Structures are given as C-alpha cells and as structure tokens.
Image (cartoon, helix red, strand yellow):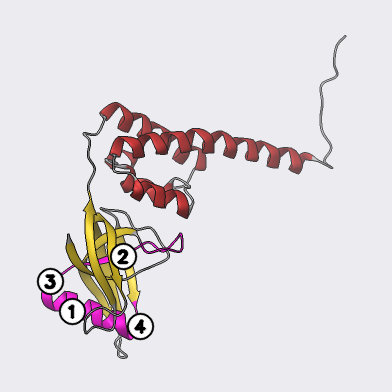
Amino acid sequence: MSELALFPLNIVPFPGEPLNLHIFEPRYKQLVADCLRDGSTFGIPSYVLNKIELGTEVKIMDVTKKYKDGRMDIKTIGLETIKVLDFQNPWKDKEYAGGEVEYVISKDVRDISLLVQFKEKVAELFTWLGETDLPDVSDVQSVFDIGHKIGLKPGEEYQLLEMTSENERLKFGISHLEQLIPALERAQHAQDRIKQNGHYKHLDPLKF
C-alpha cells in the first residue's frame, strides 16, 4: 500500500495515457505545487460511477503554461491502475484529498494472438470511419493505448480498469468492436436509404 494525493475527476484515465489538465482550483494548485516540489505523483480516481474506488496514478511531465492568477496547464502521463482504500477529504493538513491506495497489476502474460486480433479490429474500425487524425494501430501494445478511441462508454472504460488481466481486456475490446462495427454499418445503410426517400430513382424493371 501507498499514500497518494488524490484528484477525483469524471473521466477514466488509463495507464500509459498522456493527459493534459487545466488547474484552476486553489486546492489543486496546492496539490500540483506539492508534487512539483517533492517530485511525487498523484492519483486520479475515476468518478464515473459516482464512487471513489478505482483510478490511475499519474506523473507530472511538464507545466506548459502558468497564468498570472496562479492557474496552470500541465501535462501528465498515466502510470499504474490504483484502488483507493481510504479516501480522506481534506487529507492531513492539505486542502486537497488523499489517502491509502494499492496498485492493481495485470496478473497474466499477454496473448499475442489476441493482441493481433484486437489490432485488426481497431484497424477495421478506423478504416470504416475514414478519419485522418487517429493513432497508428501498429504502435498499439495494450487496450489502454487505444481505449478512448474505440467508442466505449465511460462505464465500459471503467470496466477495463477493473480487469486485472490484459487478455481479459483484449477479449472485451474484441467483443465490443465485433458488435460496434456492424451496428455502425447498419446505421450508415439506414441513413443512405432515408436520404433516397423522395428522390427520383432509376430502377431496372423486373423481368418475369
């Protein structure tokens, strides 16, 4: 177990994910100042299910901008998944929250065949979407690398944090994409048919 300063947010940050934050509340200005002074990390519990339980430890990588009124823009990187055992607000003599946490570590060896299948499904989704500003699928080594880009709901992203097996996360991601892609295709076909209503159509006559 460890003690961490805690910054609850209504998001699900993932281990390994870059996260930019705008710091404006006095208590979190103090938190950031303490972390910068001590070289310490802090935790972001994910408050998407109206509870403080799981989140991600993050490290401040850079302060990109300081404002005259004390606000800051910071860059962080996710480290490990954490489970909050004791949430105190305020914490000790600080203005911000904190408490005891334990680290949630994957307990299995990643199945490469599952990773390949997952990446193929992600590539299929990205090709279907036709977007240009998307991550390079070849760089993906974990579901966490791409978890915010595959159409998961916040509750489903939270489920990924709950899983202690990378293979379980890969199977979850594959199953999600196997359902999502056909649904998107059906929606597109329905939209195309709706657009045709009211227009003159050239139809080949049926031959009996």
Q: Amino acid at mark 2?
A: Ile
Q: Amino acid at mark 4?
A: Glu
User: What residue did someone put label 4 on?
Assistant: 25
Q: Residues within 10 Å of mark 1 (few under 14, many from 20)?
A: some
Label number found at residue 75? none
Q: Earlier in the sequence, mark 4 or mark 3?
A: 4
Q: Amino acid at mark 3?
A: Gly
Q: Earlier in the sequence, mark 2 or mark 1?
A: 1
Q: Which secondary structure, mark 1?
A: helix
Q: Residue 157's x, y, as percent?
A: 41, 50
Work out which quarter of the rendered image holds the N terminus and state it: bottom left
Q: Earlier in the sequence, mark 3 or mark 1?
A: 1
Number of the front mark, 2 or 4 = 2
Q: Residues at badges 2 and 3 in contact (C-beta under 8 Å)?
A: no
Number of the front mark, 2 or 3 = 2
Q: Which residues are magenta?
A: 23-52
User: What residue did someone put label 3 on?
Assistant: 39
| The one of 56 and 102 positioned closer to us in this rendering | 102
Residue 48 part of the magenta-drawn span:
yes
